[in-house]
Image: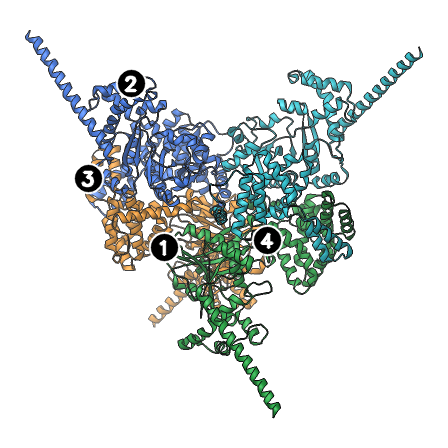
Chain colours: A cyan, B green, C blue, D orange
Amino acid sequence: MATTRFSSVLSSIAERGLSIMGLSGSGRKQADAAGIIELCHMLLSSKGEASGIGLSFEILSQYRQLDEDEKTKFFHALGQDFSPDRDAVESTAKAYIELPSPRNLAALASATVPVRQELLMRLNQAPDATRHLVNMRADLLARIKHDRELELVDREFVQLFTSWFNRGFLELRNIDWHTSASILEKIIRYEAVHGMSGWEELRGRIDPEDRLIYGFFHPRLGDEPLIFVEVALMEQMPGSITDVLASNQETAVEAANTAIFYSISNCQKGLLGIPLGNFLIKQVVEDLQRNYPRLKEFATLSPVPGFARWLQQARAGNGDTLLPEDTIAAIEAVGNGEWWTDEKLSRSLEKQLVPAIAWYLCEEKDSEGRPIDPVARFHLGNGAKLERINWAGDISTGALNASLGIMVNYRYQLDEIERNHEQFANSRTVVASASVMQSAKAFRNLIKKADVARKRSEAESAEETVEDLTV
Amino acid sequence: MATTRFSSVLSSIAERGLSIMGLSGSGRKQADAAGIIELCHMLLSSKGEASGIGLSFEILSQYRQLDEDEKTKFFHALGQDFSPDRDAVESTAKAYIELPSPRNLAALASATVPVRQELLMRLNQAPDATRHLVNMRADLLARIKHDRELELVDREFVQLFTSWFNRGFLELRNIDWHTSASILEKIIRYEAVHGMSGWEELRGRIDPEDRLIYGFFHPRLGDEPLIFVEVALMEQMPGSITDVLASNQETAVEAANTAIFYSISNCQKGLLGIPLGNFLIKQVVEDLQRNYPRLKEFATLSPVPGFARWLQQARAGNGDTLLPEDTIAAIEAVGNGEWWTDEKLSRSLEKQLVPAIAWYLCEEKDSEGRPIDPVARFHLGNGAKLERINWAGDISTGALNASLGIMVNYRYQLDEIERNHEQFANSRTVVASASVMQSAKAFRNLIKKADVARKRSEAESAEETVEDLTV
Amino acid sequence: MATTRFSSVLSSIAERGLSIMGLSGSGRKQADAAGIIELCHMLLSSKGEASGIGLSFEILSQYRQLDEDEKTKFFHALGQDFSPDRDAVESTAKAYIELPSPRNLAALASATVPVRQELLMRLNQAPDATRHLVNMRADLLARIKHDRELELVDREFVQLFTSWFNRGFLELRNIDWHTSASILEKIIRYEAVHGMSGWEELRGRIDPEDRLIYGFFHPRLGDEPLIFVEVALMEQMPGSITDVLASNQETAVEAANTAIFYSISNCQKGLLGIPLGNFLIKQVVEDLQRNYPRLKEFATLSPVPGFARWLQQARAGNGDTLLPEDTIAAIEAVGNGEWWTDEKLSRSLEKQLVPAIAWYLCEEKDSEGRPIDPVARFHLGNGAKLERINWAGDISTGALNASLGIMVNYRYQLDEIERNHEQFANSRTVVASASVMQSAKAFRNLIKKADVARKRSEAESAEETVEDLTV
Amino acid sequence: MATTRFSSVLSSIAERGLSIMGLSGSGRKQADAAGIIELCHMLLSSKGEASGIGLSFEILSQYRQLDEDEKTKFFHALGQDFSPDRDAVESTAKAYIELPSPRNLAALASATVPVRQELLMRLNQAPDATRHLVNMRADLLARIKHDRELELVDREFVQLFTSWFNRGFLELRNIDWHTSASILEKIIRYEAVHGMSGWEELRGRIDPEDRLIYGFFHPRLGDEPLIFVEVALMEQMPGSITDVLASNQETAVEAANTAIFYSISNCQKGLLGIPLGNFLIKQVVEDLQRNYPRLKEFATLSPVPGFARWLQQARAGNGDTLLPEDTIAAIEAVGNGEWWTDEKLSRSLEKQLVPAIAWYLCEEKDSEGRPIDPVARFHLGNGAKLERINWAGDISTGALNASLGIMVNYRYQLDEIERNHEQFANSRTVVASASVMQSAKAFRNLIKKADVARKRSEAESAEETVEDLTV
């Protein structure tokens, strides 16, 4: 509570600092990148503390008023103006090569560190600065996609954020109906997997005794969650999201033996690549176990966001995998009308597509040998096991488009997590249940058959051509 | 509050991590530096998270059990085993010299960063790790004094601590009689200027309405204060510490117009050199102003810890300054008996010694041109003004030994702080009141006279010698 | 925080208590009044503590399951079964008449206290009991209107609630966007003056810096507010609710000099008649003054809920006041169409109706000599002054129906509150501004004129009759 | 936290109220009972709220300045001036006898309630009033012992306190080294059983993991504990207080299976007779069970404060029980020197005195049939079982004087507590273990023998006398 009282102290010091420099008040001109860069140089050369805080505050405020073009200019200037001095690097490098002493090494190391790093650390003095810097990096990342030159600017953000968001600084919190509205509205806004229409729906996910949300917070980001996970306590592992979200499914907490993680949302785009999520699940499992000793199983109910895209590419022949005819027919059938109302049809589609998705999850890998499905990569990388594939797990339009309505359970077994994790990290082994393995294997046979068929057909048509020629 | 609940979660994960690695439990052998270094290598190569936390926890625990010799060995191993690879630095340096591209710069920069840095960041995952690392650095600093080779090991500590203890992460808190005993006992222990005998004395410094303590805390150090300042609200600027500490001096808060900072204590030896203190006073001034709008003056009542030492050296002729005879006589008189009971004697000593201390504070500088007195350096560097010198301000034995009983008021004027600070930073200007300046000037004349007298006497004795010779 | 941890301890004890008595678990029959009354007798004779808490818990749970008829039966039984014993009262009364000793007085006093009081106190041991008892009284009050016999049952509720909700036990709290959702949803639900459609509208009333809500809470009711007041900081006293609620009206807090209380809502029907509200405003004024020293004026913007009803009765000739013809015409015009879009018409209606409402507020009194308008009674009784009448202050349908769209400012002047309050309490003096007084006086003349005219017309028609007769 | 902010609001209102009445400020005369009583009459007739709070505040302040004599006068005036009106009671009594209607009953009941009750409720409005009223009652109770006339004044205190300190309002809290110094210093001060010399000793009772303190608090008494219990988690039921308090006895919490309540202290003399304690132990047992599921036994290690006094009276022949000669010899031996260093002697004394104390605890009853030992009465009344008698359990001087050094374990068995409690409440049954029962029975035989012996000796001496006479 003392914190709140003192939070405005910092703002006063910033104000005072600005007024000392004659920068405060109204008569300021429209913010632009060049002006901000000039302030950044002032900040790096300033010695006064209040003026330093004032400048940081002013820079971050002006930055937020920039339009998209000026922001781009700002990042480019960051890349050019605050990089290491080439001559200094060269001369210290030469000195080290001549005499590799600790002193020369230290000089070389210092010379290679861009002043950008010092700049970011000084900016972080301003009130609320960490939050603004996280948002600044989000802007930067949006540009990097199209502008690889900016990648080098990101380096110092990553280094500082890795240090500031070091696991030890993260705070696990329980989010419930007694949590402040200020935090809860952010949960509504950031939920990325199964969106909420508003407060009543949120309430349904935190107020019942068997529904929980846990989040990671950081002391300097205040009410801003970094990442959160939604949990349902249930009597068995659910196969469909309806089992979890339907409001009349409330379980007596005493009877619950399974904790289901049914939604994990990253909240801060500016923290992309700073590892937060895997650690969250482990801590939550630990806390759940302690508070609900009857819980025996911990698992997710997860989407398979990349499945449809992969199928499409495979049909287009872009990948290594050749889809069997029946699979292609099934994909088309899924796109046409409400098959789930026709149980027989549904069964036959399931028979085609479950092996395909098993194959996709277990065998389709990216350039580093990891599953191409991002959710699979996340949980398997965390040490979970691919437990079960659930046909018609989510028949909302979005889910049908992304994963043909299939959902997956990844299972967290406390005694196995670390071993699975190490295996995955070292040899990219995907741990899956026997039945999922079987499905994937079945699909392998279909592919082979399809391949053989194709080759045969190619051979035949080649023969035909030959025959033609012989005419 | 949620934090408390979750704090033990981390320990459980650490325990689990250790047991996975077969390291937990009793059968462990006596800790030694070599064993810990081995664990450090394991930590750097480990990929599992629980095992990483477990290893960090184990390393920090074993470190605390080391005896002094083994700790020294550990630091030396840290310096040797986890430094940058010489070949890698050389080859990347050469590549950069050949082609100074961003990519080659990045490669060179990476090669110069010791893995020690990654090691310290990983260690920081363990429960309570930041506290243990701060203590570890305290051990390191104690060794560096005698063993300059260890300096390079300190570099990564400084870098990480500067980032972790970045001002933005510090929390200002009010410490009063409602504060937890766990924090208060540390205040008693860490008070370094006017020590407290126990709880009752502490109570006298926080429970009266006109006595306050403010401290900086860090989210990861929990109840450990980083630095704190003790404040008395008074009706005028006091000249003697008795005015402040005497229990019957309570001021009606409504009548107070002056806030006196009468004690500032650094608590963490392991944070030496990480800047904390100057910022504290500024925030406290801001907060006091807000809560006690009647306050008009902010000043310290400070010791002059280096005065006696300097006098001694000057007498021994080690410095540039030649002490006048009367000053020397006065110094001796101060050491002999209770002069403060004899008002006339006290006055005459004051007349001799106040100019001397004014000179000492304003004119005696270190190699960087800053005052040699550490307290003067601190406050003047903060932007305060040397306002007043108080004869017989503290006649406790310690104070008599260190500063001949003299105390000083440094004054913080809100409108001047930044200007003073910049002037000091740029041109080492010491800002002092007219009367202090006058005293220093008076002493300058005395020195000159003494110098002249000495030269004359030397000349005379030379003449005498000459005369002798002519005989 | 400790509280939360321990709150479930009480429930466990209650459970244990019930199981000791063989009452816990499923096999219980449908709750009815007779069964509960039986449990009440058990509770009064029980000596065990766990069993007492268990019984209280069970009684309150079963009560909540009763249908309306059974609740009525329960209250009648409360009135009959737990009243003082007639013989005991008689004999102790006789003993006292014979010998009016302290001992005999004490015996008589004890005999007159119904065991209902002890029963309610024992019920209050159960977890959450106070809240359930407040709701029970709400049920009772709803019945008393039609069933005066139950009034005697209310006596003990009033006595205990007066003691439990003694001002000293009430907690003033600031309600803002950082407040828990659990409290905020109750604010939405209980707002009785200017209803809110949902969370976004609530946010507009607490999140802007110049909009505040204060509420009274009670340690045993947890998140349940007792009463709350909504405040707007403004640059002048507003005349229309639109000035307050329009979302684009945000005032710079620094510029605000006026605090407007624009809505006060009682939350607990079961606390009717237990005084809470007047004290709330005084504490809020005190707190506002402290936190916003620039505030100079404190006033309400209030509805006049009884005005239209009074006009109707006056037109029907039920009261003492005879409405002038022009007033009646104006009332009708207000009911017909959107007069506020026609400025000239609006002005002419204002001229008629403002004097009427001034008269209504200042002169129309209830049987105890207090204003018949409940809101006027509340604020004038609190020591406020009737400052200004605002034509077209609220043209929502409800407000047009209740007060012809007029709103009123009651002004709280710190130096006058107590004097006004005492005057009102002692001599029913209504304190009003000169202009309101003027308006009321003007209306008095109109009434007199109307009266004279009527009497003349009656006389004339009487004469005509006479004439007729003389024909 | 909001609470703190608002606590001074009340003081401001009180100040304002006083200044309205011209009572504030310095020029007040010395407080005396007559003046305060006059203010009490003003308070009862005051209608203003601020003035009411101001008056209450003033009355309570002046009361605290009274000397002992004036306080006595004040209580007598409270008894005389604020009692029910004799005529009103008589006339309403007569009316009821004539017509015992509900209305007449209500009138009679009202007439018998002293205005003292209304006075105390109004006093309770002032800031901190509840605390001051509790202290006022402590003063009253100290007088009642010698002045039975004041008993009637206590009646309204008891009624209001019973309502205000109704169990539902009490808050259980854990007290540990993180608790505020303000609370901890009260724990040191109030500890009544095994006194603490200061903060270090307190720390030893709350900081180790296996040592806990729980207390009851009340929302209106702030940091003032009402009652607290000290707990040690141990591996077996200890027989000596040294086993508990010795600092090197720390138990691994994981190994602990027994929770020992070794000290219970009431803190507020002014709450004597308001039941708090028994409920505390039950809640603590419940909380311990939840947090330390390995705990199997809950017991006290208690003194027997009345044993020595009873022995003395028995020796003096004041009671019904005649002490055997050997017992008397043992009592004397205990008073002479350090018998505990002589194991053989110690054993023989134990053999004599353990049966005596078993008898004392089980058989010596007060006028209501309850054990005369207050600690036995408390725990047995709570539902505990007298489990074991420990020879030489506490050989501190105080304990030797009060109980000949013997300590007792009362055992709380969760499944038995309520049954034991009901049995004790209904039939005064003392539940004791077989071995204690045996000891008591053994002593019964000794008494009988002693009685027989005495009678025989009397008979003999009578015979002798006869013989003499016959001479």
Could you tell me how far apart the alpha carbons at marks 4 and 3 are, in whole angstroms? 68 Å
The residue wearing badge 1 is: B254
The residue wearing badge 3 is: D91
Would you call the spot at circle 1 few (<14 residues within 10 Å), some (14-19), or many (20 or more)? some
The residue mark sitting in front, 1 or 3, is: 1
Could you tell me how far apart the alpha carbons at marks 2 and 4 are, in whole angstroms? 88 Å
Question: Which amino acid type is shown beneath numbered disc 2?
Answer: Ala
Q: Are marks 1 and 4 on the same chain?
A: no
Lateral position of residue B462 relative to residue B338, left or right: right
The residue wearing badge 4 is: D235
Q: Is mark 2 on a helix, strand or loop?
A: helix
Q: Which chain carries label 4?
A: D
Q: In this view, does B305 lie above or below A289?
A: below
Number of marks drawn = 4
Residue at (63, 41) in percent of width and height:
A77
Q: What element carries label 4?
A: loop
Q: Is mark 3 on a helix, strand or loop?
A: helix
Question: Which amino acid type is shown beneath numbered disc 3?
Answer: Ser
Discs 2, 1 touching: Cβ within 8 Å? no
The residue mark sitting in front, 2 or 3, is: 2
Residue B328: x %, y % from top left: 51, 77
The residue wearing badge 2 is: C333
Lateral position of residue C402 relative to residue D315, left or right: left
Question: Which amino acid type is shown beneath numbered disc 4?
Answer: Glu
Q: Is residue A86 above or below residue C261?
A: below
